Every structure is written in structure tokens, then in C-alpha cells.
Amino acid sequence: MSGKIINIEGVGDILIERSRRAKHINISLRPFKGVRVAVPCGVSFARVEEVAKSKVKWIKKHLERMDGVEKEVTELRKSNHIDREKARKQLVKRLDELSQTYRFNYNRVFIRNQKTRWGSCSAKNNINLNVNLVRLPDELIDYILLHELVHTRVKTHGRNYWNELNKLVGDAKGLDGQLNRYKVLLI
């Protein structure tokens, strides 16, 4: 993947990167990372710069929103320090309780500071949990833990998976939607 940084007046630096996966020119903004443009192979950087300049108004609008998210995250981090060992004990204890109650078996559990997901379950039934789960309401912590435990039986997110999860939590899709309010904690 090759890339370059351009500066657009009123916006600042923009990272342009070639991507084999990109089908179209794709502009994205990420807190603490800034503006990135994914470029399909075969599209010139000059063309990308034209497109980026034509989207300045859109980029500025989203940069303002992103600035607010960055401030919110910074405040959360200052005011809400996580004791990793305490978080680990809390999450593993609850995972064990739920796995015993609903008769799930998992192999190992890892607590990490992940940037994009609340949890995951490997093919070997190892469960990874995000340390930031302890900042969520108890109902959502249980939802995530059960979400990963169900993956020890059903590996995909197909109909069978959601039916199984709904038996345990009721409205799985509704709970999943509530997590959107807390996405900022994943940054």
C-alpha cells in the first residue's frame, strides 16, 4: 500500500492511501487519526485531490463532529480510569457465572484494550473481551458476554446464531443497537 499526505486549505493534512480492496474513492474520518482517503489502484493522486477538494464542506462538517468526540473521549479517559486487574476479575467472574448458568464451555479468556470491538470468540473458543466493557451498563455487559458465549456453539452471525442469542437476552438486535451510544469508548 502506498500513500501520501496532502494539505487542503481549511481542512489540513489528509492521508491518501492506495488500497487493493477499495472499489471507489472513499473518504473517512477517525478520531485521533484524521482524514484518510482510500484510493483504488489505477486512480491518480491528482484525481483524488480534486475529489477531496470538492468535498471540503462535508469534511469540515465531520471534522467538527469528530473534534467533539475526541474531547468527550479525552474527558472520559481522565475522569474514568480503569483498574485493569479489577476489570479482569469482574469480567471473568461474570463470564463464568453466565457460562455455568447457560452451560457454555469456553477455553481461555483474554482482556484487552481493543479499538474496534467489544469482544470476540476464536475458533478454539478463546474469548477476547475489551477492558472498556466495565464502563457499560450491566445489561450490555451481559449481552456482550452472552454474545461471545453463543459463538462457542454457533460461529457465524446467521439466523441460528441470533435465534440462540434471543433465547437468552430477548431483543438481541435492540441491545446491539444500544451499544452504538458507547462506541466512543472504543477509540
Image (cartoon, rainbow, N blue to C red):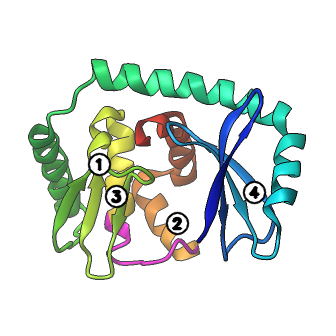
> Which numbered disc, 1 or 4, marks the residue that appears first in the sequence?
4
Query: Taking 135 as reference, is 140 above or below it?
Result: below
Query: What type is the residue that disc 3 sits on?
Result: Leu
Compute the Cα span from label 2 to label 3. Answer: 11 Å
Label 4: few (<14), some (14–19) or many (≥20) C-alpha neighbours in 10 Å: some
Query: What type is the residue that disc 4 sits on?
Result: Asn
Q: Nearer the viewer, mark 4 or mark 3?
A: 4
Q: Does 26 lie within the magenta span?
A: no
Query: What type is the residue that disc 2 sits on?
Result: Trp
Residue tagged by mark 3? 146
Label 3: few (<14), some (14–19) or many (≥20) C-alpha neighbours in 10 Å: many
Q: Nearer the viewer, residue 126 or 115?
A: 115
- Image location of residue 131, percent across then percent down: 26, 45
Q: Main secondary structure of the magenta part?
A: loop
Q: Nearer the viewer, residue 12 or 152?
A: 12
Indicate the secondary structure of the residue bearing disc 1: loop
Tell me what residue is drawn at x 36 percent, y 23 percent: 76
> Which numbered disc, 4 or 3, marks the residue that appears first in the sequence?
4
Which circle marks residue 162 in the picture?
Answer: 2
Specify start and end residues of the magenta stretch as a single range.
149-158
- In which quadrant of the rendered image does the N terminus lie? bottom right
Label 2: few (<14), some (14–19) or many (≥20) C-alpha neighbours in 10 Å: some
Which circle marks residue 26 in the picture?
Answer: 4
Residue tagged by mark 1? 113
Compute the Cα span from label 3 to label 1. Answer: 19 Å
